[in-house]
Amino acid sequence: MKKTIFINPPSYEGFDGGAGSRYQARREIKSFWYPTWLAQPAAMVPGSKLVDAPPDGLSVDQVAAQARDYELAVLHTSTPSFGNDARFAARLKEENPAMEIGMVGAHVGVLPLQSLQGAPAVDWVGVGEFDYACAELAAGKPLNEVRGIAYRENGQVRFTAPRPTIEDMDALPNVVDVYKRDLTIENYFIGYLQHPYVSLYTGRGCRSKCTFCLWPQTLGGHRYRVRSADSVEAEMANAKKFFPQVKEFFFDDDTFTDDLPRAEEIARRLGKLGMTWSCNAKANVPRKTLEILRENGLRLLLVGYESGNQQILNNIKKGIRLDIAREFTKNAKELGIIIHGTFILGLPGETPATINETIRFACEINPETLQVSLAAPYPGTELYRQAQEQGWLQIQTGELVDTHGVQVAALNFPNLDSSVIFQSVDEFYRKFYFRPRKIFSMVGGMLRCPEVMRRRLREGVEFFRFLHDRKEATPASRAAGTSAAGS
């Protein structure tokens, strides 16, 4: 067995570099997701170590020193962080030329040849689900015998046979054991989740066909492959025992509510464990199911509304009607379920009018909190293919964030300039949060709970700093887009 270290590399300040993050950029408020995608193979390799540099605030020098004596390093990368991660891999090789380095994640899985060419220090990359490939490589299996990778041989890039999709999800070991062993859970923050929190997956894949969504189109697939309720219950019981200080558990499945009977069964078991929990959901969960989830500890739903314009939702194959989303939101609020809504500006069909329509829709349904993102055409997604075909790409591959980790407007439409899309994010936040109704609601919550007050004040400072940094980044973002478009 090779001495193996799994690493989420150091990155931009305040940037969760992608090991589990769905929104791979600096957030409005400091946020770090758990590196579940790395923790899973780490749990399969005896004696391994997981280092998550961004939330721990570790520098390149500090991580390189930790990794120096390992034989195999597995780095998780993403499209926005790939260049940075390639340089980090080179640093590891400088420290230990004999070290074998692999890269995993959606980016290298979609672009294995380009990734190996762009990261000379990397010996192999994972293609598809990489859990068992990592375990086999750590066990010393020759590169050419490990399915589901691309690797170097005599100056050439070779591809092994594809690895079948994992069907027996219960066979995968628990990630909370690795969390307990290697992570400091107090370092993980999400603005809308209680702190400290713990997140993990109970399944992979999503039945929805959203054209922009990275994970189902690259690693997860469009079948929801799940762990049994027994398996989930056992891991959650362990998690509660390992982390008595945790106030909330989050299920980061693409759409936990894809399988309603299973969601209800797991909820009942969590209720018996006395756990507070939250999950990703589509804006179409029936009231009956919401009642069961709420009665058994559900606190919050993270809901991807994306747009307030029905045609845009149709364009991106969201599979949701606005009237259904309104009814779902109304039901959730009546039941006392908090909603964190996510929206995307700059999707196909966007115009100044539809941006205003989405802002009005968000104010109408009034989720507790929201996140506004710019449409990000990740390689491997239908949105990326559309953007290439239609000439919408304002950037070159990898330039989804600027040099500070702030999202750039990646798409430019004939009737909507990318700079307008970029500036509309600030307008969206201001029109939503600076309403008297929302201000009174937030102040009321702060007055009722001193802990909430301390947290909201800190987050408020971070939020305004983020808006200021975005304003400062606007010229740089425009320059990046202009350079890419003219090259």
Image: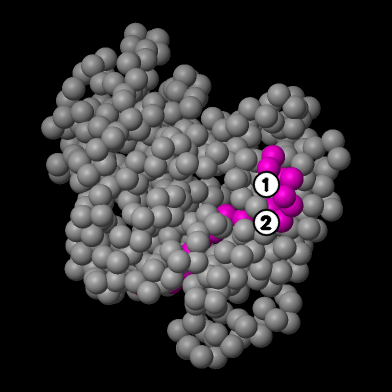
Query: For residue 301: magenta?
Result: yes
Is 382 placed above or below 265 here?
above
In the picture, residue 414 is in which quadrant?
top right
Residue type at the position of mark 1: Leu
Is 90 placed above or below 478 here?
above
Q: Which mark is residue 322?
A: 2
The picture places residue 342, in percent across and down from the top left corner, at 60, 58
**Which residue occupies the foreground of this view, 180 or 63?**
180
Q: Residue at x 74, y 45 (%)?
A: 311
Q: What residue did someone put label 1 on?
A: 313
Q: Secondary structure at mark 1?
A: helix
The magenta segment is 297-315
Q: Residues within 10 Å of mark 2 (few under 14, many from 20)?
A: some
Q: Residue at x 45, y 43 (%)?
A: 206
Residue type at the position of mark 2: Leu
Q: Are marks 1 and 2 in contact (CB under 8 Å)?
A: yes
In the picture, residue 439 is in which quadrant?
bottom right
Q: Residue at x 73, y 82 (%)?
A: 436
In the picture, residue 384 is in which quadrant?
top right
Can I make out residue 235 in this image? Answer: no
User: Left or right of 396: which side holds 61?
Assistant: left
Q: Residue at x 50, y 76 (%)?
A: 335
Of label 1 and label 2, which has the lower sequence position? Answer: 1
Query: For residue 471: magenta?
Result: no
The picture places residue 51, in percent across and down from the top left corner, at 31, 49
User: Left or right of 134: which side holds 394?
Assistant: right
Q: Secondary structure at mark 2?
A: helix
Q: Where the N terminus falls, by quadrant?
A: top left
Q: CA distance from mark 1 to mark 2?
A: 9 Å
